[in-house]
Amino acid sequence: MNTKDTPGDCCSMDTSKNSHWNKAYTDKETEKLGWYEKEAKPTLDLIKDCNLPKDTRILNVGVGTTTLIDDLISEGYSNLIATDLSEKALEILKERCGTENVSYIQDDLTNSTTLNTISQVDLWNDRAVLHFFLKEEEKQAYFDLLKKVVKIDGFVIIATFNLNGALKCCGLDLCRYDKAMIAERLGEDFELVKDFDHTFINPAGSPREYVYTLFQRKK
Ligand SMILES: C[S@@+](CC[C@H](N)C(=O)[O-])C[C@H]1O[C@@H](n2cnc3c(N)ncnc32)[C@H](O)[C@@H]1O
C-alpha cells in the first residue's frame, strides 16, 4: 500500500458484491478467469496513443489481476494506481507486480470512500467494469467519481461489452454500451479521440464483443 493513498473503509463496502468478486478470484487462477487477457494489447495501444510521460499518473479501475499492469511496468510506467472492490484480486496483483511502481487501493467505484480523496490522475482506465453497474445511482456515482478524479487534458479509456456483447459475465447481468452512450454519460467536457470494436476470445474460446473508447477531457 502506498503511503500517499490510504485503504478504503471496509465498513462502507457492499459485502455481497465484495464476496462475489473475492470468490471469483479465489476459485480460479488468473489465467482461467473469463476475462483473462494474455496481453492487454488494445488497452496498451490506446495508452501509447495518449503520448503521456512514463511517470504519468494512471488509475486502473476494477483492475482485477490484469496482465496490463505487468506490461505497463515493462514499458517503464512508474506511477500506476491499481484499484478494485476485491481485496483478493489486489493481493494477487500486488504479489505479482510489487509496490515500486504501483499503489493499491481497495474501494467501491459506486460508493467511494478513498478514490474520491486522491490527487487527480492523467488517465482513467477501465476494461470490463462499467458494464456491471445496472442501477442509475451506480452509473451516476461512477461518472461523478471519474469527473472528480480526471485532470483537465487528462484521458479516459473505457472498454465495455458493446451492443452485441454477452448478457452476463461472472454470473452477473450487464448493461452494454456503444460509444455514443459512453459519450453522453461523460458529457461535453470530454472529446472522443478514438474508438473501435474488438472481439476478445476468452479462455474458453468464446468470442466476446467489446467497444473500446478513448476520450480526452477538454474542460
Ligand atoms: C471482469 S473483471 C475485469 C478485471 C480487469 N479490468 C481486466 O480487464 O482483467 C471486473 C472487475 O471489476 C471489479 N469490480 C466490480 N464491481 C466493482 C466496484 N463496484 N468497484 C470497484 N471494482 C469493481 C471486480 O472485482 C473485477 O476485478
Image (spheres, helix red, strand yellow):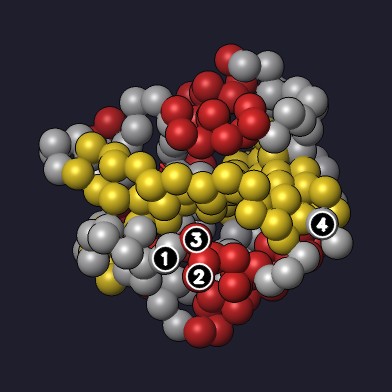
Q: Which residue is mark 1?
A: 177
Q: Amino acid at mark 1?
A: Tyr
State if disc 3 and disc 2 touch (CB < 8 Å): yes
State if disc 2 and disc 1 touch (CB < 8 Å): yes
Q: Helix, strand or loop at disc 2? A: helix
The first of marks 1 and 4 along the sequence is 1
State if disc 3 and disc 1 touch (CB < 8 Å): yes
Q: Is mark 2 within 8 Å of ligand 1?
A: no
The residue located at (45%, 28%) in the rendering is 41
State if disc 4 and disc 3 touch (CB < 8 Å): no
Q: Which residue is mark 3?
A: 179
Residue in front for this viewpoint, 42 or 195: 195
Alpha carbons under labels 1 and 2: distance apart: 6 Å
Q: Which residue is mark 2?
A: 181
Please state the horizontal and vertical placement of residue 120, each as a whole percent of the image. Answer: 82, 52
**With respect to residue 161, does 154 lie above or below?**
above
